[in-house]
Image: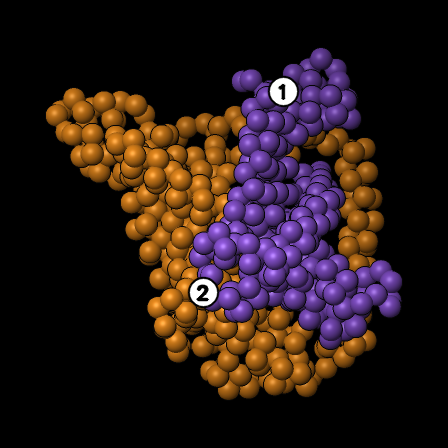
Chain colours: A purple, B orange
Amino acid sequence: MLQGLSELLAEYDVLAAFWMTIKLAVAAAIGALLLGTIVAIMRVSPVTVFRSAGTAYVTLVRNTPLTLIVFFCAFGFYITLQYRIGAQDSPIDVQNFRWGVLGLAIYHAAFVAEALRSGINTVPKGQAEAARAIGLDFTATLSTVVLPQAFRGAIAPLGNVMIALTKNTTVVATIGVAEASYLMKGMIEFRPDLIYIIFGIVAAGFVILTLPLGILFTALSRRLAVKR
Amino acid sequence: MSAETSVLFDAPGPKARTRYLIIAVVGSLGILVLLFLLVRALAAKGQFTAEKWAPFIDPETWTAYLLPGLRATLVAAFFAIILAIIGGILLGMGRLSQLRPVRMACGAFVEFFRAVPVLIMMLFAYYLFLFGFQISGDALPLLGVVAGLTFYNSSVIAELIRSGVGSLPKGQQEAGLAIGLTPFATLRLVLLPQAITLMLPSIVSQLVVILKDSALGFLILYPELVRSGQTLASLQGNLIPTFIVIAAIFIIINYLLTRLAHYLERRLQARRRGPKQPELETVMSPTLPGGALEVSGQT
């Protein structure tokens, strides 16, 4: 077993594949947080049009498989329509990576928006009422009373989204980005005799990536929880 | 909506209403311009020509590709949810067991399979059936998809069950024990039936996740909706229209399921609260235990 493990590690660059997973996750997380915050603001805005547009985005994206969204980006926009992200002459794998990140960001933005909104919803009505009663105006109510509590309430669900995002980077293997699950498929096809070890390596990699994230977000949400 | 809006802002006065109207007009124009640019870009590449969309009024497109694909998706989701519910209940019971080893083993199982991505599990199951059990043919991809979905989702449902039991009033368990039931019988006869009813909305939401995740079967050649759609698209040369149609099918089914989950949740709440009670103070319906899992269980 140890021999199989060392053979695999010598032959395949497992670390590079997981590095790709990390790069995908970080880039997509930044995109999802940015886009998701915009959608969340739209969803709670006083203007009906924005609220409907935000709701429409969340409903449409949440109910579509991530696989389909990633395909739409890679096969639809990139291959069929010939759109490129960034430098026009960048090679195919760079383009696939970027479109994959975009697909992941679009998909998870819907969940980020829902997490932020649920954070706003944890703030009791009395808080805003009390703020207005002592004479704070809208901006002050929002920025000094409601939002600080809302962000704290959103940490746990946001953590769940980030963990799901890390695991969902595997979907990008379907468009040929050489991350962990892509490597796993290749490894098993060439060394089916070592299938258990291969699964063990890849599964352990994901446990190592997601477990600290879970502990971190749980600890943060406990520490920052608003006592009620 | 009205309860929600009042947390962040007062009911608008005349001045604010005018301001909102102006913002609304500018905002809708902005959104329309964005949509227009997208549609124009697609149209410029000839994605809205009649020939790209004509296949969808041909019955054969539906009978030969889309409906069989949808059927395969639903079949995989059906088996997966049944097995996941059975596995989830068993694992959930295991996590609540009096026996420490059983509790720990089930806990480790649940935590492990929640951390491993569904696609990884699917690939492993597929190749294990192929190389380990020498299974081949049409059943192989289905087995891979169902196995991958089952392991992950039974772990999620086990957590739902556990938090459902945890949210029951303590008196339920005490009453069960007081009338002389064993701890196991209390769990089985008193706690679980209530927990499962309580978790019904979350289980329906999990079905949405399973339906979406079945699309991962694409990678192990399971002829589900996305793959059969891609076969169709490569034949007709209309990838983007096909993807739009497939997305619409998924969105409609999943939207209806989500509505069903909300309906169940409202009914259960009405039942627990009894008729005619004032709205709760917090804006969102008090999330059922495991409500956060609805988000975490996504692929």
Quadrant occupied by the C terminus of chain A: top right
Quadrant occupied by the N terminus of chain A: bottom left
What residue type is disc 2 on?
Answer: Asp
| SS category of the residue bearing label 1 | helix
What residue type is disc 1 on?
Answer: Gln
The front one of A181 and B283 is: A181
Q: Which residue is mark 1?
A: A127
Residue B20 can be seen in this image = yes
Residue B212, percent from left and from top:
51, 59
Circle number at residue B256: none
Horizontal arrangement in the rendering, residue A223 relative to residue B201 (left or right): right
Residue B8, percent from left and from top:
68, 30
Residue B10 can be seen in this image = no
CB atoms of marks 2 and 1 within 8 Å = no
> Crowdedness of circle 2 by 10 Å Cα count: few (<14), some, many (20+)?
some
Q: Do the residues at pointers 2 and 1 share their chain?
A: yes
**Residue in the image at 69% along x and 18% along y:** A131
> Crowdedness of circle 1 by 10 Å Cα count: few (<14), some, many (20+)?
some
Q: Earlier in the sequence, mark 2 or mark 1?
A: 1
| SS category of the residue bearing label 2 | helix
Q: Which residue is mark 2?
A: A193
